[in-house]
Amino acid sequence: MALTLALVFKVRLSIALLSGALGMILTRIIPADRAYEAIDWRLVFRIAGMIPLGTAFETTGAAAYITNHVLALTGNPGPLLFMAIISLLTAFFSLVASNIGATVLMLPLAMNMAVTIGTDPRVAALVVAVSASNTFVLPTNQVNAVVMRPGGYKTRDYMRVGTGMTILYAVVLIVCVKYFFVL
């Protein structure tokens, strides 16, 4: 029912899934008590705590300050180095804020900086969009947080494995940018 609402009737996915969950409770497929017990409340509060952190990071100008200073340190980077920097900055902001917050923050910065160094701003936008999902280092991403408790993982487990994954993700992205786009 939820997928039909989302795919056929173009209802927003969040509303369609909520109606599907409500439908399962009303038809007693899943008892309400069991559904309530299945919620990991630590996860809910962790995600809720990240929202004001991301807002503060954006509204205080800390994210723009970091971005501008990192680019000032590199001087006038070439297109591929610029894309790598944008990719890693977006991944960092996705860890401390949300992937949506990082995208909203980095998209205009990356596109303006791309124009400044003489490269295609559309490619910079693509790098930002893809890099916003590069959140393997900390369990701040909702997907990572969901598997943390059932898997018995600790933050250090994410840091140990996620650092390599983050670097690999960025390298594959930059290689794809190099071979599939003209910079």
Image (tube, rainbow, N blue to C red):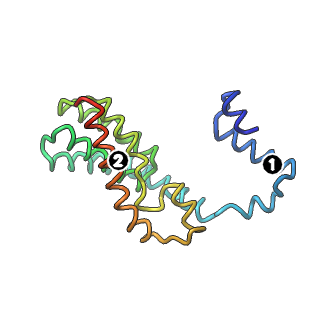
Residue furthest right as drawn: 27
Q: Is residue 66 above or below residue 33?
A: above
Q: Residues within 10 Å of mark 2 (few under 14, many from 20)?
A: many
Q: Tag 1, which secondary structure?
A: helix
Q: Position of residue 105 (x, y in %)?
A: 37, 42
Q: Is residue 136 above or below residue 9?
A: below
Measure how far apart labels 2 and 1 are at the Cα level.
38 Å
Q: Position of residue 138 (x, y in %)?
A: 43, 62
Pick whichever, 104 or 181, lies toward us. 181
Quarter occupied by the C terminus: top left
The three-letter amino acid code for the residue at tag 1 is Met
The three-letter amino acid code for the residue at tag 2 is Thr
Q: Which mark is residue 24?
A: 1
Q: Residues within 10 Å of mark 1 (few under 14, many from 20)?
A: some
Q: Which mark is residue 90?
A: 2
Q: Position of residue 123 (x, y in %)?
A: 31, 32
Report whether 154 appears left or right of 64: right
| Residue drawn at the location 75% of the way across and 43% of the way down | 20
Q: Position of residue 134 (x, y in %)?
A: 40, 51
| Residue drawn at the location 75% of the way across and 60% of the way down | 36
Assess whether mark 1 and mark 2 are in contact (beta carbons under 8 angstroms): no
Pick whichever, 2 or 33, lies toward us. 2
Q: Tag 2, which secondary structure?
A: helix
Quarter occupied by the N terminus: top right
